Image (cartoon, helix red, strand yellow):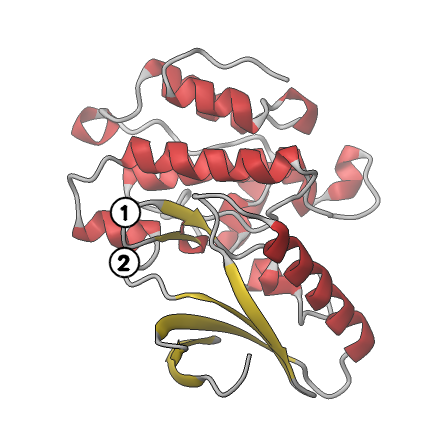
């Protein structure tokens, strides 16, 4: 991209104008001592994946910029903010409809052998037509020397148990998978329908221990519990299975959101 003009509006996010359209630039900084070659290699891989994805529920990539100490991905600016901000301002919005869109976007990724890796409310944006669009695509870890960055970024409530402690599940490392995406999708459904982050009453270290012990968010009661029908709650329970192999596919989650009891596949 040539000669864009940007203004800092959020940490690591800049708003700007490019060829007459409002755009957002997501910036990852490369610090002295970082493995620059490795970081830029991952940046190019993420950009390649993002640029390949075309779907109404995925945020399109418009371009990239790379300097000695900054890596930038540019996309359309979403003036409605993320799904949590949007539903707070528009409390009567069809949240289930938005979640179906989220799930369709994830299905599109999974069908192409791609993993999101950082699915949570802040990474789901709402376009000018009111459609949910997945963003984020594991950009949080592009400039990270350690794989523990999501913990520092508050990702724990959406993090599957096998990513928290892979060795306890017979794994050597904590690479996100289709099944960890589905676990996070269940947390996003809970987040959007309840209006609050999962485990919001607990410190993250306690959440870490609770999840490894098999504990999950409790089903809301009374008026707050009305969006959580028996079928939807069963969907969440399936998404949150301790064993990744027991979780459903995103396609089966979509069926559950449409009212069909979930199955594992």
Image-based side of 232 in relation to 225, left or right: right
Q: Residue at x 74, y 71 (%)?
A: 39
**Quarter location, residue 145:** bottom right
How packed mark 2 is, by other alpha carbons closer than 10 Å (few <14, some 14-19, many 20 or more), is some
Q: Is residue 246 above or below residue 150?
A: above
Residues marked 2 and 1 touching at CB (< 8 Å): yes
Q: Position of residue 91 (x, y in %)?
A: 17, 43
**Residue 29 against residue 176 in the figure, above or below:** below
Tell me which residue sits at (46%, 26%) in the image: 236
Mark number displayed over residue 242: none
Residue 72 screen position, x and y as percent: 57, 75
Q: Secondary structure at mark 2?
A: loop
Q: Which residue is mark 1?
A: 130
> Circle 1: is it few (<14), some (14-19), or many (20+) Cα within 10 Å?
some
Q: Position of residue 169 (x, y in %)?
A: 76, 34
Answer whether residue 195 is visible to the viewer in this image.
yes
Q: Position of residue 31 (x, y in %)?
A: 68, 84
| Residue with the most extreme front position | 19
Q: CA distance from mark 2 to mark 1?
A: 8 Å
Which one is nearer the viewer's eye here, 19 or 95?
A: 19
Apparent side of residue 18 relative to residue 167 in the rendered image (left or right): left
Q: Earlier in the sequence, mark 2 or mark 1?
A: 2
Say whether residue 186 is left or right of residue 91. Answer: right
- Name the residue carrying label 2: 80
Q: Residue at point 67% right, 38% down? A: 112
Say what secondary structure mark 1 lies in: loop
């Amino acid at each position: 991209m040539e000669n864009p003009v940007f203004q800092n509006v959020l940490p690591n996010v800049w708003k700007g104008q490019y060829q007459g359209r409002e755009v957002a630039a997501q910036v990852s900084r490369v610090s002295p001592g970082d493995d620059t070659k490795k970081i830029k290699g991952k940046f190019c891989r993420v950009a390649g994946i993002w640029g390949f994805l075309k779907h109404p529920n995925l945020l399109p990539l418009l371009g990239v910029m790379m300097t000695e100490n900054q890596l930038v991905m540019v996309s359309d600016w979403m003036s409605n903010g993320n799904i949590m901000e949007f539903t707070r301002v528009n409390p009567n919005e069809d949240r289930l409809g938005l979640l179906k869109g989220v799930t369709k976007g994830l299905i599109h990724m999974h069908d192409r052998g791609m993993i999101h890796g950082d699915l949570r409310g802040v990474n789901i944006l709402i376009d000018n037509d009111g459609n949910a669009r997945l963003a984020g695509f594991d950009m949080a870890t592009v400039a990270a020397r350690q794989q523990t960055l999501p913990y520092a970024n508050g990702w724990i409530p959406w993090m599957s148990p096998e990513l928290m402690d892979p060795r306890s599940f017979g794994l050597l490392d904590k690479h996100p998978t289709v099944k960890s995406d589905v676990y996070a999708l269940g947390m996003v459904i809970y987040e959007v329908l309840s209006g609050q982050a999962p485990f919001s009453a607990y410190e993250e270290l306690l959440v870490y221990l609770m999840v490894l012990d098999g504990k999950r968010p409790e089903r809301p009661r009374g008026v707050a519990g009305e969006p959580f029908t028996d079928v939807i709650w069963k969907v969440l329970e399936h998404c949150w299975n301790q064993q990744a192999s027991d979780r459903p596919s995103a396609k089966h989650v979509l069926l559950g959101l449409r009212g069909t009891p979930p199955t594992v596949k």
